[in-house]
Image: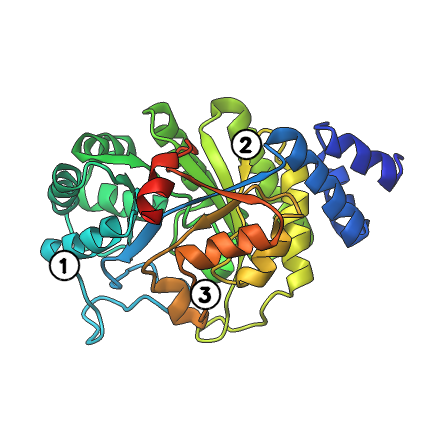
Amino acid sequence: MSSLVSLLDRAASGGRLSFDEGLRLYNEADIHELGAAAHERRLQMHSPDVVTYVIDTTINYTNVCNVHCSFCAFFRPEHHKEGYTMSHELVLERVKYAVDQGATQIMIQGGVNPDLRIDWFERLFERVRAQYPQADIHSLSVSEIVGLANIEGITTRDVLARLKAAGMKSLPGAGAEILVERVRKRISARKVQPQQWLGVMREAQLLGMPTTATMMFGSIETAAERIEHLDVLRELQDETGGFTAFIPWYYVPHKTPLRGREATGLEYLRVLAISRLYLDNFAHLQASWLTPGLKLGQLALFYGCDDMGGTIIEEQVVHDAGSTNEATRRDIENAIIGAGFTPVIRDTYWNPRPEMALAMSS
């Protein structure tokens, strides 16, 4: 059996870990040594001086959802008195507000609302594309795509193709949680199953739509199930190369039906580090400051992360679960600078956008 040191050295240089090796490192490696290996790997892959971020917003257009996940405090069931759906005009107002602040990425996400047909989204995306061509529509989720396919009686590929034609350029990784059937039966029994989530991602990528991958950890899953989640993502990435980044965040339990405990900072850093080492075919690892806060986000930059995520000008889902973290663009830049790096604005596809820095500083 290889020593922990040799496993860390191999992973730090880009060598592939097996499932058992990844689980062993996750369970047994010293947190500082695991982080050092992940940081070394990150420095090999990207400029050692630069940390990127994107100016973006998340517009939660509806909270009506027929999936009813137990870890979600945001959704309201159909016909609930607190349910809402924004008009196209209100969504466009929110897009304008974000674009006026320099946003280049617009994430429009909500619940799986059975009252909304695909033409509602087509008309909305066409208007966003026409009025704000400088902003990329990085929107919806696998659950919403599957919901639309069920409502319309068409394939998920057809849904993706129609939305792409309307202006949706990429598909976020929301809704992955843990891609293990046991976990999903416990926390989101009515949601798409692991192979269905992976299948929709594959379809989007084959249509030329980049996607991100996510993991919500800290609910009921085991350490082995966390590694299993990474393993199926790595397998699909081997096949398609269509994931641009991996974004793990921890479950916020305070106002959810599932309840439970909140992950510790050390647990968050350990997940980041093993993700950077295990996902050897993913270019980018993002620090999700929204749940752990900016101070832990700074530390994440030494545990494998090369990106600080987005400004998330507007967001309700995590907020409703009990997270109170907020950050302006200046806050994010100061956190990056404070950690000893140079902040660089990017777009959805990790292209540097230096002209945005000039425009925003003038």
Q: Residue furthest front?
A: 362
Q: Which residue was labeled with disc 1?
A: 90
**Picture quadrant where residue 357 is located:** top left
How packed mark 3 is, by other alpha carbons closer than 10 Å (few <14, some 14-19, many 20 or more), is: many
Q: Which residue is mark 2?
A: 283
Q: Is residue 13 visible?
A: yes
**Which amino acid lies under the numbered mark 3 shown in the image of this protein?**
Phe
Say if 339 sits above or below 77 in the image. Answer: above
Q: Earlier in the sequence, mark 3 or mark 2?
A: 3
Find residue 71 and name its label.
3
Q: Secondary structure at mark 3?
A: loop
Disc nearer the start of the sequence (2/1): 1
Q: Amino acid at mark 1?
A: Leu
Q: Residue at x 17, y 45 (%)?
A: 121
Tell us which disc is closer to us: 3 or 2: 2
Q: Could you tell me the amino acid type at mark 2?
A: Ala
Label at residue 232: none
Residue drawn at x 68%, y 38% is: 277
Image spot of residue 88 (x, y percent): 12, 53
